[in-house]
Amino acid sequence: MMSRPVWRVWYGLIGNIPIPEITPPMVLSVIKDIDKTRAIETASRVKQRLSAIFCYGIATGVGSSDPADVIKGGACSTEKGASAGYHRPGKVAADDC
């Protein structure tokens, strides 16, 4: 379940707008706003939750598209693999060989 403060951030920005009227730029604005103040992982989770809401809207006939699905790349992209925090500076290249 999503924490209440994060829920308030996105709901306050697009929560009162009908699902069919929400556009990808609106979703991107919400994600970038969260990205500025919280962890990238939180923004990614919010994007996933919003996408689930849009998918539910499509399934119930309320909406016809998922504006969160088209957001790729820079917003809420996390690298997979070992975190830089687990390596000693200057040793990353040598340790990965």
Image (spheres, rainbow, N blue to C red):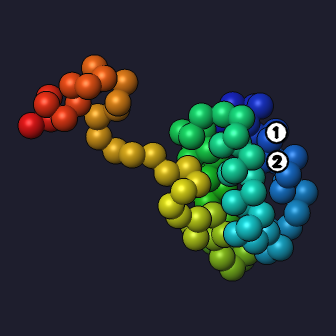
Question: For residue 8, which numbered disc appears in the image?
Answer: 1
Residue 88 x, y percent position in the rendering = 28, 20
Mark 1 and mark 2 residues within 8 Å of each other at the beta carbon: yes
Image height of 67 relative to 3, above or below: below
Left or right relative to 67: residue 41: left
Left or right relative to 20: residue 40: left
The Cα–Cα distance between marks 1 and 2, rounded to whole angstroms, is 5 Å
Question: Which residue is outermost to the right?
Answer: 16
Residue at left offset 54%, top offset 39%: 41
Q: Quadrant of the N terminus?
A: top right
Q: Which residue is mark 2?
A: 11
Q: Residues within 10 Å of mark 2 (few under 14, many from 20)?
A: few
Residue at left offset 88%, top offset 63%: 17
74, 52: nearer the viewer: 74
Residue at left offset 50%, top offset 61%: 73
SS for dot 1? helix
Q: How many marks do you count on the picture? A: 2
Question: For residue 66, which numbered disc appears in the image?
Answer: none
SS for dot 2? helix
Left or right relative to 18: residue 81: left
Say which amino acid is labelled 1: Arg
